[in-house]
Image: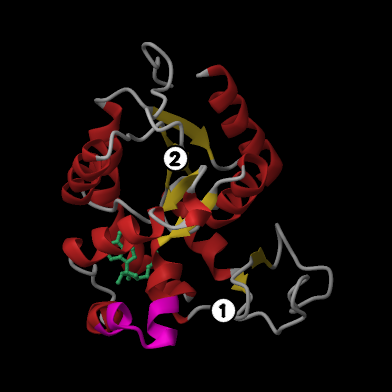
Amino acid sequence: MNAPGGGPAASPTGRRILLLVGPVGAGKGTQAAALSRELGLVHLASGNLFRQALREGSPLGEQARTYMEHGDLVPDDITIQMFMHELSQPAAARGAILDGFPRTVAQAGALDQTLSERGEGIERVISIEVPLDDLVARVAGRRVCPVCGTPYHVDSDPPRVPGRCDKEGAELQQRDDDRPDVVRARLDKQIRPMLEVIDYYNRKGIVQHVDGRQPISAVTEEILEGLRTGW
Ligand code: AMP
């Protein structure tokens, strides 16, 4: 773990901006939901925001469509614009947990710059770490509610009624890009830029490294403890 120096930097505006970083299958979505509840911060997940824009057929969705369909990153300017828009909404008044963004060092630099122009900054980067071999198996069991987006796992986080969302009762789905062959390809593409992003924030001394192989609640508790104590 990194020594935080003077402890986590509080944003001058008083709102908390946390980043959650980890490869597909590390449990980011699950941790983000728990942290969002515990801390009262909105959870902004880039993939979900883009998929929602696609479903709504908004101009943003149309701009993002071809990239997403090819599994490519949406260009930085579109992605940053989308996040800054979300951060300007009342739901983000107390702060936000960003998930899936920034995904490249270029995005990280642009985010830092845009936030600092507003007198804000990232308080903490939480890196959830799981060995590569465990990830593919984990992702294959992942299911999601098509209505509210709540994530489940057939083994480690099952719904009360198999195959049905606890909140909506809707039939849970497996995302096409969670199938094992697609997951390997996604991991290959994701890992290197993600390590570069972590390295970028490591140099700033704001990364909390968390062992994502622990039970879900232990991971949440370790993160919360880190935020309380400045680890
Ligand atoms: P995800 O659900 O996070 O895997 O994201 C699904 C798709 O949304 C990706 O394949 C990209 O096309 C797009 N996307 C998500 N996050 C970003 C990002 N930070 N920058 C650019 N494109 C993104």
Q: Amino acid at mark 2?
A: Leu
Q: Nearer the viewer, mark 2 or mark 1?
A: 2
**Farthest residue, direction right:** 160
Instruction: Give the magenta range.
Output: 52-62
Give percent across and percent down for residue 73: 24, 67
- In which quadrant of the rendered image does the N terminus lie? top left
Horizontal side of residue 59 vs 123, given as left or right: left
**Which numbered marker is on residue 18?**
2
Label 1 sits on what residue type? Gln
State whether residue 6 is above or below residue 107.
Answer: above
**First along the sequence among labels 2 and 1:** 2
Q: Quick check: is the Cβ at mark 1 less than 8 Å away from ligand 1?
A: no
Using residue 161 as the reference point, say whether residue 230 is left or right of it: left
Q: Position of residue 14 (x, y in %)?
A: 45, 31
Q: Which mark is residue 65?
A: none
Helix, strand or loop at label 2? It is strand
| Identity of the residue drawn at 56% across and 60% down | 138
Q: Which residue is mark 1?
A: 174
Picture residue at 42% right of the left edge, 48% below the top: 22
The local secondary structure at tag 1 comes to: loop
Closer to the camera in the image, 209 or 45 = 45
**What residue sits 40% from the left and 14% below the top?**
3
User: Are there few (<14), some (14-19), or many (20+) residues within 10 Å of tag 2?
Assistant: many
Horizontal and vertical percent position of residue 23: 41, 53
